[in-house]
Image (cartoon, rainbow, N blue to C red):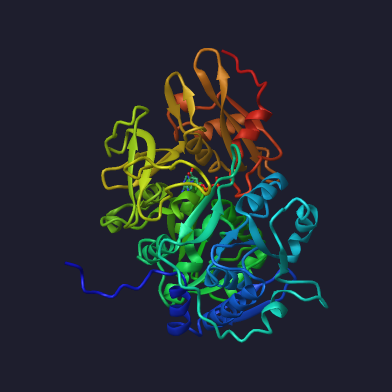
């Protein structure tokens, strides 16, 4: 017997068709690098994506070809997401902040055929063009005046074309991990996984989207599939406000002018915004929901946003998980909790959204209890979790689908995830673990501390002990003793860093995370006294 329902393949183009049909005049606003602002809407995005599909066909691009973008957030980049997939191609969003070596490696590894880019990244193109072996065409989104670019390239076409028909399991997008160790690895998403991930992102516990949502996605389109926002937003007709420039003043002006209700970004985005608020005294306008992920959001940040009446959706995920794994949303007893207890809850990384399963295991792969105490290696499985890296010859998950995330975590009885650390960053002191993430989060709450990074330093007796590198806020003279006094009642006694060192700058990865490998090199000869 078979079911008697319609079999329509889950294709990413269904999302844009729906957006244009049901939410056609919901706007997409773009602030460009040259300070100009443009407006289109979901129907306009679809119309341009169809023209782009024809223009790509005219270049000889066909099913399965990789189409790269090297660009910030704006409407033409959004058009390209749908246009690249519409021709049956595989959208490959590249992070322009990667090192040259990595940029060369991933575009060649992906065998990209066409590259779309922002004029701001012209120097990268000029530098690396000769080393990119497969790219045949370069098209600029915002060319200097008097030269042709993306708009002129799609203009001759009429949009009278069908989207390529794809199988659910055909690939549609390729994203590389940032490769903090070794070469970046490609994760290849399918139409099915992408559609399911987009639908799951629509539950109120995830992004809190509806047709009234006005979202400023600060997470770049090149970072971890932009958390799936360009796909999920289409399903709900979200109004997107994009900025190609990530400056707090510009972002804030846009928030006010467009009455932005939702935003999404990594924690550092908010540090910049808070500084701007402190300098100018401005508030956050209509903002009511901030999704924060990519790194742990510090308590002080969560508290400040919540005090301003903003719901914080603390999310955890990775490129390998499409990326949403968990998102925080108010628990059933939320209204009975004190403000502090609510903040405690939001500091954890939320609960799995429907579709994914989590578990933790010890070093011998024994399943650990969800008791809120035991921590171990975090595994995940589900229909939008990686099976195998692009061009790899073995699966990245075990025979039951479990993928080892490389994170160390605790699961609570109600399913809440609490990330302790990345397994390679955890500080191993006398056989016990100290969470570098926790030390950093507590330290940045101390007045006068702008940024903190904790690493393990060799210790003759304890194996490793924590060293905390601190960047002071401008004009701050905060001392080691003051930081220690602040941290004293907030962490276990034996977690107190053995050394606190002030630095001018903490090294970051291309996705804005602390580059611990670099920091460890910097402090390689550091001696702790026994
Ligand atoms: P990369 O930055 O290496 O390209 P991802 O963006 O895929 O890769 O990063 C995924 C990793 O980021 C996770 O494995 C986890 O260590 C970290 N991460 C993501 N969200 C959070 C969070 N809310 N709290 C703590 N760590 C997080």
How far from the left and from the top, in percent, is residue 445?
53, 43
User: What residue is drawn where x is 37% and y is 40%?
Assistant: 398
Which residue is the extreme one toward the right?
146
Q: Nearer the viewer, residue 60 or 104?
A: 60
Look at the picture and state if 476 lies above or below 4: above
User: Tag count in the figure?
Assistant: 0
Given residues 438 and 194, the one toward you in this image is: 194
- In the figure, is residue 132 to the left or right of 64? right
Query: Height in image: 264 above or below 526?
Result: below
Residue 462, relative to residue 85: is it above or below?
Answer: above
Q: Position of residue 238 (x, y in %)?
A: 47, 74
Q: Is residue 143 visible?
A: yes
Placement of the N terminus among the 4 image quadrants: bottom left
Above or below, comparing residue 409 to residue 51 in the picture: above
Where the C terminus falls, by quadrant? top right
Residue 482 located left or right of residue 360: right
- Would you identify the image quadrant in which residue 500 lies? top right
Which residue is nearer to you in this view: 348 or 334? 348
Nearer the observer, 304 or 66: 66
Residue 418, horizontal then vertical, whole percent: 39, 43
Q: Residue 244's x, y, as percent?
A: 66, 66
The part of the image, by quadrant, that contains residue 223 is: bottom right
**Residue 284 visible (yes or no):** no
């Amino acid at each position: 017997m078979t079911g008697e329902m319609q079999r329509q393949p889950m294709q990413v183009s269904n999302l844009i068709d729906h957006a244009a049909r049901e939410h056609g005049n919901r706007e997409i606003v773009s602030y460009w690098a040259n300070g100009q602002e443009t407006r289109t809407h979901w129907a306009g995005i679809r119309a341009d994506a169809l023209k782009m599909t024809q223009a790509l066909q005219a270049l000889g691009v066909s099913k399965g070809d990789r189409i790269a973008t090297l660009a910030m957030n704006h409407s033409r980049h959004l058009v390209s997401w749908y246009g690249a997939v519409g021709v049956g191609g595989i959208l490959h969003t590249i992070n322009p902040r990667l090192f040259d070596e990595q940029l060369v490696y991933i575009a060649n590894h992906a065998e990209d055929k066409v590259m779309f880019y922002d004029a701001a990244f012209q120097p990268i193109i000029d530098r690396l063009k000769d080393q990119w072996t497969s790219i045949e065409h370069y098209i600029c989104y915002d060319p200097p005046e008097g030269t042709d670019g993306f708009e002129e390239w799609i203009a001759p076409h009429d949009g009278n074309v069908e989207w390529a028909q794809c199988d659910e399991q055909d690939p549609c997008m390729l994203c590389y991990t940032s490769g903090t160790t070794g070469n970046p690895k490609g994760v290849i998403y399918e139409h099915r996984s992408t559609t399911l991930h987009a639908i799951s992102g629509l539950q109120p516990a995830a992004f809190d989207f509806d047709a009234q949502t006005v979202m400023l996605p600060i997470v770049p389109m090149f970072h971890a599939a932009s958390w799936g926002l360009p796909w999920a937003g289409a399903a709900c007709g979200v109004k997107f406000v994009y900025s190609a420039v990530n400056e707090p003043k510009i972002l804030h002006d846009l928030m006010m002018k467009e009455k932005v209700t939702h935003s999404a970004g990594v924690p550092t985005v908010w540090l910049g915004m808070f500084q701007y608020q402190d300098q100018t005294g401005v508030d956050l306008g209509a903002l009511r929901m901030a999704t924060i992920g990519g790194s742990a959001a510090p308590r002080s940040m969560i508290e400040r946003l919540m005090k301003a009446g903003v719901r914080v959706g603390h999310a955890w995920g990775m490129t390998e998980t499409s990326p949403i794994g968990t998102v925080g949303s108010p628990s059933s007893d939320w209204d009975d909790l004190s403000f502090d207890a609510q903040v405690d809850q939001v500091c954890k990384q939320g609960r799995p959204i429907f579709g994914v399963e989590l578990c933790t295991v010890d070093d011998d792969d024994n399943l650990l209890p969800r008791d809120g105490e035991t921590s171990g290696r975090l595994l995940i499985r589900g229909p939008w979790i990686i099976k195998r890296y692009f061009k790899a010859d073995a699966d990245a998950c075990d025979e039951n689908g479990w993928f080892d995330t490389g994170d160390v975590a605790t699961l609570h009885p109600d399913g809440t995830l609490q990330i302790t650390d990345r397994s390679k960053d955890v500080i191993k002191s006398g056989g016990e673990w100290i969470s570098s993430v926790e030390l950093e989060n507590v330290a940045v709450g101390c007045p006068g501390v702008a940024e903190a990074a904790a690493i393990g330093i060799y210790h003759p007796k304890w194996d490793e002990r924590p060293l905390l590198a601190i960047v002071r806020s401008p004009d701050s003279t905060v001392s080691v003793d003051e930081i220690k006094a602040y941290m004293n009642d907030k962490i276990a006694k034996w977690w107190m860093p053995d050394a606190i060192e002030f630095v001018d700058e903490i090294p970051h990865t291309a996705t804005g995370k602390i580059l611990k490998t670099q920091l460890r090199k910097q402090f390689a000869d550091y001696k702790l006294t026994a």
